[in-house]
Image: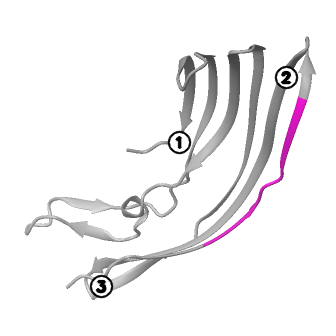
Amino acid sequence: MARPATFLKRRSAFIPEGNGVSEIFGRELRANAGVRYVHTDQRVAGPVQVAAGLVDAIQDPSYEKVLPSLNLTYDVMNRVKLRFATSISMTRADAGSLSAGLTFSDQGAQVATAGNPNLKPYTSENIDLGGEYYTGGIGYVGLSYFRKNINGFTG
């Protein structure tokens, strides 16, 4: 029976945030801004078959990222709001993709799958722009545009 891969992760983060309200042309502008700094150290170990049997392949990757965000809401009229947001977000690769081991999926050892513990998280630069009209009851009509620029994704 094969040994499973093991993952150890130590992560530290620092997240300052600010909120504010101002007035432009007699209408309210609300703002929220923040920055998240993340540093992660990982230890990934997984079994690899060699002539002498199973041995653990061990990798110790690390990464750090700065992830800013800004959100603005402007009251154009009593029932109309414009929203703008921009941010950078981060997602770590799934555990199966990070596994340091090598797996053969057929008896003849012709097909193998290997993970890559040195995969870096992928990031997305995000922009959102929207408008909302509030009907006065419990509903509203909204229109939004968004753009996501994804970097480093491995499928």
> Given the current orientation, which residue lies at the most extreme bottom position?
52
- The residue that mark 1 highlights is 152
- Foreground of the two, 134 or 148: 134
Q: Distance between the residues labelled 2 and 3?
A: 65 Å
Q: How far apart are marks 3 and 1 (CA)?
A: 32 Å
Residue 91 location, x and y as percent? 54, 50
**Three-letter code, disc 3:** Leu
Q: Earlier in the sequence, mark 2 or mark 3?
A: 2
The residue depicted at 70 percent of the width and 62 percent of the height is 39
The residue depicted at 30 percent of the width and 69 percent of the height is 102
Instruction: Determine whether the residue tagged by mark 3 lies in a helix, strand or loop.
Output: strand
Crowding near the residue tagged with mark 3, few <14, some 14–19, many ≥20 C-alpha atoms within 10 Å: some
Magenta segment, which residues?
10-21
- On residue 28, which mark appears? 2
Instruction: Name the front one of labels 3 and 1.
Output: 1
Work out whether residue 36 can be spotted: yes
Quadrant of the frame with the C terminus: top left
Name the quadrant containing residue 48.
Answer: bottom left
Q: Which of marks 1 and 2 is nearer the N terminus?
A: 2
Magenta stretch, main secondary structure, is strand
Q: Distance between the residues labelled 1 and 2?
A: 39 Å
- Foreground of the two, 42 or 148: 148
Q: Earlier in the sequence, mark 3 or mark 1?
A: 3
Instruction: Determine whether the residue tagged by mark 2 lies in a helix, strand or loop.
Output: strand
Work out whether residue 59 can be spotted: no
Q: Does the magenta stretch include residue 14?
A: yes
Instruction: Determine whether the residue tagged by mark 1 lies in a helix, strand or loop.
Output: loop
Quadrant of the frame with the N terminus: bottom left
